[in-house]
Amino acid sequence: MEVINFRRNDMFCKIHSMALLGIDAKKVDVEVDVGNGLPGINLVGLIAAEVREARERVRVALRNVGVPLPAKKITVNLSPADLRKEGTAYDLAIAVGILCGLEMIPPEFTERVCIIGEVGLNGEIRPVPGVLSCAFSAREDGMEWIIVPKDNGQEAVMVDGIKVFAAETLDEVIDFFIGCDEKEPLMREYQAEITKSEEDFSDIRGQYLAKRAALIAAAGGHNLLLLGPPGSGKTMLARRIPGILPPLSLEESIELTKIYSVAGMFRPENGRITKRPFRSPHHTCTPPGMAGGGARLPVPGEITLATNGVLFLDEFPEFRRECIEVLRQPLEEHRVVISRLYGNYELPASFLLVAAMNPCPCGYYPDRNRCSCSPDRIRRYMGKISQPILDRIDLCVELSAVPLKDLSDKTCGETSAKLREKVTKCRQLQAERFKEEPWRLNAQIPSAGLDKYCVMTRKAEQKLVNSFVSRGFSVRLYDRIRRVARTIADLAEEEIITEAHVSEAVLYHAMEGGFRGYNGGLI
Ligand SMILES: Nc1ncnc2c1ncn2[C@@H]1O[C@H](COP(=O)(O)OP(=O)(O)O)[C@@H](O)[C@H]1O
Ligand SMILES: [Mg+2]
């Protein structure tokens, strides 16, 4: 390779790169100084072990593309100093910084370029997570170009207003800087049409109460618990809930795309994520798998992957207790804080929880012909879900197996499109009502705001009080029922909650005092 020398007085140069913090990226500068002293590369700036190893990767890679390092002392500083740098994404910026320090590439142009990528020993550039977030931040920082690994190219081009150079090898990056001709930015590839879901609400026969509860859940953002024997259609119903939520807003879509980019699960050929996620982790899922983790870079868990969509937990009591307990904070705050040795980071976790469970370990209670579970066993099974979690689930419905005559019924219920219209309208109403508040949905009204926002007729209030007395409801249910009644009234486009709305809201709490007369240990 032809090496051109660009003479200048100082031997100091600065290259821009990005650090991932949660799902957002922050600028990191790679400063390189080449001077006299003990030959070798010295890396400083609060760096993790894998960043330190960049020294070896970069040295070998440079040699393999024909740039042996001179007998000089090369100092590489990653700033800001108070931000811990992790991962392998700084390799390429370090390599370019060294080339710049050695005056092999001109420094002027590098000021407007952000560089991300891992470098292999043979000089190939390997993909890294979170390139989409890096491209967003680079544009915000006023960069003209972003250089990314070839495999991440389509991710970076999703961001308008910054030019992308997607490199396969270190050679290409060197050519990019020393090539004099106009550089062609990578173009966005054809975006595939998103395939429409084949699953529709009108497929579900019978189960009117459950379908209605799903509509209320989607409209007001209420978490939902489905209770019923195997084959009653719990999974079928849950899978159709993302399809009745309003279409993703641009911000929601970008947030999701960033999340999947950080998780390394983003397929650029499908374009920006435009479909609400449906995540259905198995009950053997681990707490970090659920909440997220990662010793170095953030690894989003199921609750983050379900952001702006549905988290479906089938066989709810079978999940490990710790797995269920980690849901508490996210259900309240719509984010999850992951603590690590070197500082915490935060990931979004704003999802609709849909949990499903059998009424007993064998699944057939209260059918005494088929169920052989002892009351004690059932109580223990139910007791696996803690009260603080149940307090965050506003809606609970029981499903029974659909009678044969209903299954063969060919009259279709409402379609997903029709229900989505209702949900969207209802959510607009809430957004308007809560525009001065920090929350957007009825399910998020804090207890202190209920008197203001859930105004009831005298009769409705009386009805609610009576239900509590006759059914032995607990006081903490009071707020949950008021929130649900608010959504039911909103679906009917009524500002004042009436008796009918309260009567319906009460239906979705069959669990209180035991369902179907069984005085189990649930509440
Ligand atoms: N209400 C229903 N309407 C139409 N088909 C149903 C209904 N309930 C169950 N099915 C059929 O039974 C199958 C099993 O239902 P599933 O949702 O897996 O039940 P569960 O999750 O409650 O065990 C479904 O794939 C569907 O074909
Ligand atoms: Mg199922």
Image (tube, grey):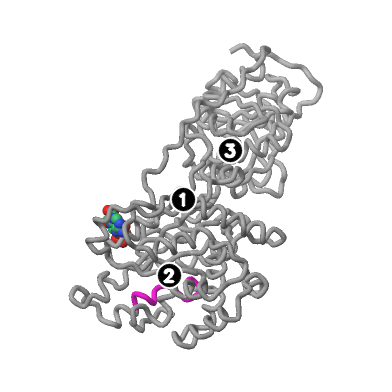
* Residue pointed to by mark 3: 132
Which quadrant is home to the C terminus?
Answer: bottom left
Residue furthest to the bottom in view is: 469
Relative horizontal placement of residue 71, taking residue 237 as reference (left or right): right
Secondary structure of the magenta portion, mostly? Answer: helix
Residue appearing at x 66%, y 32% in the figure: 114
Q: Is residue 252 magenta?
A: no
Q: Quadrant of residue 458?
A: bottom right
Query: Three-letter amino acid code at disc 2?
Result: Cys
Residue appearing at x 60%, y 31% in the figure: 92
Residue 163 higher or lower than 421, as above or below: above
Q: CA distance from mark 1 to mark 2?
A: 23 Å
Q: For the residue carrying disc 3, how many other residues have a C-alpha within 10 Å: few (<14), some (14-19), or many (20+)?
A: many
Q: CA distance from mark 3 to mark 1?
A: 34 Å
Residue appearing at x 50%, y 30% in the figure: 191
The magenta region covers: 380-389
Q: For the residue carrying disc 1, how many other residues have a C-alpha within 10 Å: few (<14), some (14-19), or many (20+)?
A: few
Expressed as whole percent of the image width and height from the top left, the position of residue 304 reads 52, 53
Query: Three-letter amino acid code at disc 3?
Result: Leu
Q: Nearer the viewer, residue 482 or 206?
A: 206
Residue 42 higher or lower than 384, as above or below: above
* Residue pointed to by mark 2: 396
* Residue pointed to by mark 1: 418
Q: Which mark is residue 255?
A: none
Which of the four quarters of the rendered structure image does ligand 1 lie in?
bottom left
Query: Three-letter amino acid code at disc 1?
Result: Lys
